Image (cartoon, helix red, strand yellow):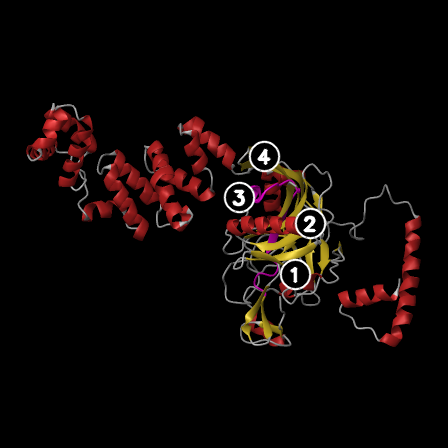
Amino acid sequence: MDKKTVTTISYLSRLKIDSEKEQKIVKDLDNIIKFVDQLNDVDTSSIEPLTNPLEKTAKTRKDEVTAKNLKKELLEVAPSANEDYFLVPRVVE
Amino acid sequence: MSWETVIGLEIHAQLSTKSKLFSGGSTEFGAESNTHVDLVDMGLPGVLPVVNKEAFYKAIRFGLATGAEINQVSSFDRKNYFYPDLPKGYQITQMTKPIVEKGSIKVLTDEGEKLINITRAHLEEDAGKSIHDLFEGETGVDLNRAGTPLLEIVSEPEISSAKEAVAYFKAIRQLVTFLDICDGNMAQGSMRCDVNVSIKKSGDKELGTRAELKNINSFKFIEKAINYEIERQIRVIENGESVIQETRLYDSDKNETRSMRSKEEANDYRYFPCPDLLPVVISDKELQEIRDNLPELPEEKESRYVSEIGLEESEAKIISSSKAMANMFEEASSKTDDIKLVAKWLVGDISALLNKYNIEIDESNLSPENFGKLIERISDNTISGKIAKSVLEEVWDNGSDVDEIIQTKGLVQIQDESLLEDIARKVIDSNSDQVAAYRSGKDKLFGFFVGQVMKETQGKANPKSVNEILKKLLK
């Protein structure tokens, strides 16, 4: 774990890190990863990866439209919207 | 130096379910903005996705039809990225355990049939739609499409030209429409594709660096974009530079591909298993049921048309080339006994009209009922084939009923032999020069007399009778 990796992660997750805390976060993350890395000592080559700890399988639904038209309500709670669309700062392609 | 092209396609086919992959929101196309948005599609806190089983069934149909392995236990992962039309900040997709793996499809190329392997086909949700040009300084977001089920079909990099890529795409489109799992409508975005293109020196084992061309939605543009990109890569390498692995956007107005590097910055999707969804299990019974109910596929239709109905192979191929065409053939055939004539008109005049207007048969004004009736009127001698062409043109224009056109325009064929004989005599009497020439051996003039009789009767004479009468009179 180094400063550059932390900068990348903070960019990807859109979380801003104060520069004075940066060194501490590098150290904290480094410790966390070292701790979790202990798991690599266990030989898991013959074990199926676990996708969910519940060991159950998914309930599914039939192909039916059940949703109501919530346009007005949803647009109302958005931080910014007009009568038809959610609005965000312009995303230029 | 000669170069080899290596192409792989990722095709997104929108599955034709009524509701979304993880919510009860409607998937209807063209609805008023943001009216088909469920709380799950919004990504609101505290909601959980629930899998639409029908999307799995449709994906499995595709798997079975391509001879693929079906993972009866499959799971979902999160692909993380930020974009306004992706409300949750991640797309739910199948990374580690896709529902379908290792299939293949036969593609017709210039060099003959080629088998293209399909690496995988997995389920994932579509994003919403961003509207960039409607509002000053802002982007509008319509989430109607968010959560619509997509089947992403990934080919092996085994395609070796732009033309072959188009042939592969067409084969996939034909298959998904026959399977009734996707409507194949490219204009509405029901099928889109990303193309991976790289080049290598002829004979080299190792693949070159690839560029990904994003979101192309027409056959024409697939071919053009790939051809442009191949030339660009050859130019880059021959200039002593190297191709960069990147995403490029095809600009159809300028016919060029452009780097999208700005968006690629620190592109890391950080896939991990989606904790909101448990593995989805398909039972043996479910799998068997899907297998038992697979619809007839294009190849099966083609050989049945030849062996059971007696069509020419070339006719059978054209008719089974699209679901709409096959439907038209089968439905019209149920309205008349002359099935071979149905086929003849479909591959002849009707195909010509379809090419001329560049549309699919189900977009035309011709209904199977009306088409069947037209064939029936030809085969019961009510109208001649020539008149039928003009009737077809009118149906094509406005969809009018065949019998009504025949009635109101007085197009019923003249069967009355004595009337036809009178007209033929008149033609012969007023063209004595041609008659003399014909009798002295100019056989080709026979067509002239037929033409004159047809002209006199406005094309309504039964051509067979006209031939017989003229032969008799000109002897």
Q: Chain of mark 1?
A: B
Amino acid at dot 2: Ile
Q: Confirm whether the magenta stretch covers residue B286.
A: no
CA gap, disc 2 to disc 3? 31 Å
Discs 4 and 1 carry the same chain letter: yes
CA gap, disc 1 to disc 3? 27 Å
User: Label 3 belongs to which residue?
Assistant: B170
Mark 2 is surrounded, within 10 Å at the Cα level, by few (under 14), some (14 to 19) or many (20 or more) other residues, namely few
State which mark lies toward you, 4 or 3: 4
Amino acid at dot 3: Lys
- Give how far across and how far down residue B343 sits, in percent: 37, 35
Q: Residue at x 35, y 47 (%)?
A: B366
Observer-nearest residue: A80 or B82? B82
User: Label 4 belongs to which residue?
Assistant: B114
Label 4–label 3 contact, CB within 8 A: no
Amino acid at dot 1: Met
CA gap, disc 4 to disc 1? 33 Å
- Which tag, 1 or 3, sits closer to the chain's start? 3
Q: Chain of mark 4?
A: B
Q: Give the side of residue B417 with respect to residue B150, left or right.
A: left
Q: Which mark is residue B237?
A: 2
